[in-house]
Amino acid sequence: MPHSKAANSILFIMTLLGLVVVFIGIRMKNGSV
């Protein structure tokens, strides 16, 4: 099923991006202030 495989990879990428955004947000919050 190529469709489910594509959906899984997109979900995986979205999760990774979310973690990166949260990590950068925490670092900026702690570092800037």
Image (spheres, rainbow, N blue to C red):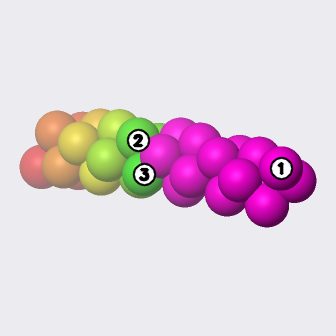
Residue appearing at x 12%, y 49% in the figure: 33
Amino acid marked by disc 2: Leu
Residue 30 location, quadrant: top left
Q: CA distance from mark 2 to mark 3?
A: 4 Å
Where is residue 12 drawn, in percent x and y?
59, 43
Where is residue 32 drawn, in percent x and y?
23, 49
Which comes before the other along the chain, label 3 or label 1? 1
Viewer-side residue, 30 vs 12: 12
Secondary element at image label 1: loop
Where is residue 9 drawn, in percent x and y?
71, 46
Where is residue 2 drawn, in percent x and y?
87, 53
Disc 3 + disc 1, Cβ < 8 Å: no
Residue 31 location, quadrant: top left
Q: Which mark is residue 1?
A: 1
Residue at numbered disc 3: 18
Binning the other alpha carbons within 10 Å of mark 2 as few (below 14), some (14 to 19) or many (20 upward) gives few
Q: Which mark is residue 19?
A: 2
Binning the other alpha carbons within 10 Å of mark 3 as few (below 14), some (14 to 19) or many (20 upward) gives few
Amino acid marked by disc 1: Met
Disc 2 + disc 3, Cβ < 8 Å: yes
Q: Is residue 32 left or right of residue 16?
A: left
In this orientation, does residue 17 appear?
no
Which comes before the other along the chain, label 2 or label 1? 1
